[in-house]
Image: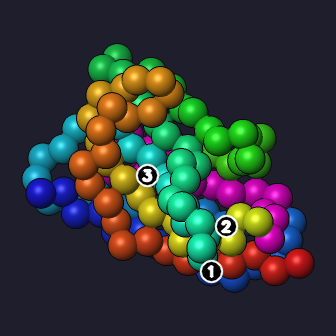
Amino acid sequence: QVHLVESGGGSVQAGGSLRLSCAASGHTYSGQCMGWFRQAPGKEREKVAVLYTFNLGTFYAAYDDSVKGRFTISQDSARNTLYLQMNSLKPEDTAMYYCTAGVGWAANECSAYNYWGQGTQVTVSS
């Protein structure tokens, strides 16, 4: 079992920045495919950014169109912590943000998402 704990959420004004972190612990997990999803009240959970790390250390990141150029997903070298740097935040970015870990890579996302964190709230005011 992999345990994911998010942190870094909060309330900011539009145009501000936040950095989310996701610490992974528990069963040995490669950390090869991890990502961030978000869910706003009354809406379905949506993919924000996903990161796949190849065995030679190279990686590939995929972003939802709504956050391209503003958000950056990254991971520490030990693959224990996943980050999401969020700049130029907009009120429509307001949501609960969830960290997820999975396996495989297909169509710019993990083939399966096996583990989820409890979420961290991000609120952006205009």
Question: Which residue is rendered at x = 44% and y = 71% of the image?
Answer: 119
Q: Would you call the spot at circle 1 few (<14 residues within 10 Å), some (14-19), or many (20 or more)? A: some
Question: Residue 20, how many percent across, how many down?
Answer: 54, 64
Q: CA distance from mark 3 to mark 1?
A: 17 Å
**Residue annotated with mark 3:** 82
With respect to residue 120, does 55 lie above or below?
above
Disc 2 residue type?
Answer: Leu
Q: Would you call the spot at circle 3 few (<14 residues within 10 Å), some (14-19), or many (20 or more)? A: many
**Residue annotated with mark 2:** 18
Q: CA distance from mark 3 to mark 2?
A: 14 Å
**Residue annotated with mark 1:** 10
Question: Residue 115, how many percent across, how many down?
Answer: 26, 55
Q: Which residues are magenta?
A: 74-91
Q: Is tag 3's residue or tag 2's residue first in the polypeptide sequence? A: 2
Q: Are marks 1 and 2 in contact (CB under 8 Å)?
A: yes
Query: Could you say which disc has been placed on residue 1 in the image?
Result: none
- Using the image as rendered, state which of residue 79 and residue 123 is in the foreground: 123
Question: Which residue is rendered at x = 45% and y = 47% of the image?
Answer: 35
Q: Secondary structure at mark 3?
A: strand
Q: Is tag 3's residue or tag 1's residue first in the polypeptide sequence? A: 1
Residue 78 seen by the camera: no
Q: Is tag 1's residue or tag 2's residue first in the polypeptide sequence? A: 1
Question: Which residue is rendered at x = 55% and y = 53% of the image?
Answer: 46
Disc 1 residue type?
Answer: Gly
Q: CA distance from mark 1 to mark 2?
A: 8 Å
Q: Secondary structure at mark 1?
A: strand
Left or right of residue 75: residue 26: left
Residue 10 belongs to magenta span: no
With respect to residue 85, does 117 lie above or below?
below
Disc 3 residue type?
Answer: Leu
- Using the image as rendered, state which of residue 125 and residue 26 is in the foreground: 125
User: Which quarter of the rendering shows the N terminus?
Assistant: bottom left
